[in-house]
Image (cartoon, rainbow, N blue to C red):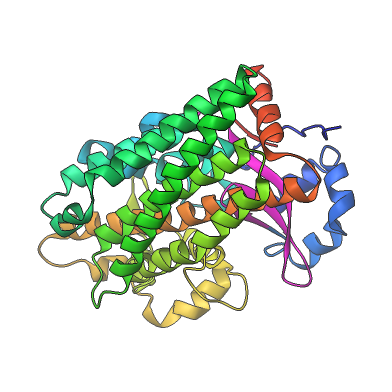
Amino acid sequence: MAAPLIVAKLVLQAGPLVHWLWQNREQFEPVFRRIGDFAAAAVSDPIGAVRRIGNTIVFGQPDGGSKVIAFIEQTAPKLDRIEQLVTEVQAGQSAMLSSLESLQVGPHALSSSVASLQSLSMVSLGFTAILPVVLHMQFAALNKRLNALLQAVRSLTKKFDAGKIAELETGIELLRLGMGAHEQQKGTDARQHYNAALRDCLHSVHYFHTLLSDQLAEKSPNREEVRVLARHLSVAVLGVASCHIGLEDDGQAIAQIEAQIPLLQQAARWVFKETAGKDPARFLSLPIGSRVVSLAFMADLFQQAKQAGAVEAKRDYTPADWFEEHRGTISPFSGRLPFIGKSQYIDGLRRELLEAVAAVEEVNRVRGIELLAREVRAAGECNREVMGQLRQAVDSGVGRGKYVV
């Protein structure tokens, strides 16, 4: 018999994740029974005891491992935000920048404002991230971005074969048909569509994996090409995972994501190094809307980058640790501004910060789905059925806004 879902409102303005979980300990008591002494860990290591990796909230284990506590699911994905993120057109930049406003000030920082990341990196899409409608929207927005960047990434557009682009689009459409047939209890039709979609999506994974590997092997990789290829690869691998979940082959879904994570991490590591990782102290006090980038925000960004494999660190980042690491390069923001072209300089910093956050969060989102799939499988459950339960809970009106399941 399937285990019941625990649905809780994700309200993090009251403090960090560990505080929120402690306040909801009665509701999450069945989970805490399985993970060890949560109270002791929370007291001894409040930063490391509870972490967010993409959509998952995990409990740190003494051996360095982690145990999934909960999974963040956005009940109503805003597809227009996906296009704003991927295309990053001028009209959409103000919306993306405003989404950063709530992440800058105070002790809560980025990890306690998970919901506001939705327009920045789709982190709050949750399990919805592997639904065909979301994958298709990401894919379509990526191709629009390619057209907009025709001059900047002309070499990349030459590499893209029209047939390969169509193949991934076809795979996503077949995946949609498979899910539709499954909902109508047409088992044979569903399996046929899933298998056909799997073939197309697998080809796309190999194709984009090769292009991304080749680009990262260049002496001077093109940052735009790295970002676009990494996002295409993410769409393709999530499509493959969706097909395997539809076929109730959870082991292969996990294996396919696991196989692509190292390359996605390598891409995120390179992008992060070229943006926020390069003289990170220059972002302190960067104006974002009516606020400024804080020390707490930068510490949490580096913590998420550590989770994504974009930076190497032996311990978790706290504001104090981050300050000690970068104290030698911290200087007043006003002193860094050029005499001429101040607005262009500030706009450039904002773009770099957005690139860094998006690169990190997108890798962690894929990792989070892998962690959830592993947790469900380890519990003897079927990911397809759990996903169905989740969507039923959402469609029934249980959730309004952001919830943890």
Q: Residue shown at 65%/37% (left/top)?
A: 10
Q: Is residue 255 left or right of residue 198?
A: right
Residue 108 in view: no
Residue 217 in view: yes
Q: Is residue 111 left or right of residue 120?
A: right
Give the image quarter of residue 169: top left
Closest to the observer: 97 or 117? Answer: 117
Q: Main structural element of the magenta stretch: helix, strand or loop? A: strand
What are the residue bounds of the magenta stretch?
51-77
**Is 76 part of what is drawn in magenta?**
yes
Task: Give the tally of numbered discs.
Answer: 0
In the rendered view, tell whether residue 161 sits above or below residue 399. Answer: below
Give the image quarter of residue 35: bottom right
Give x and y (percent) for residue 31: 83, 46
Give x and y (percent) for residue 187: 64, 24
Closest to the observer: 358 or 12? Answer: 358
Q: Residue shown at 43%/68% (left/top)?
A: 266
**Is 167 part of what is drawn in magenta?**
no
Q: Residue shown at 63%/42% (left/top)?
A: 12
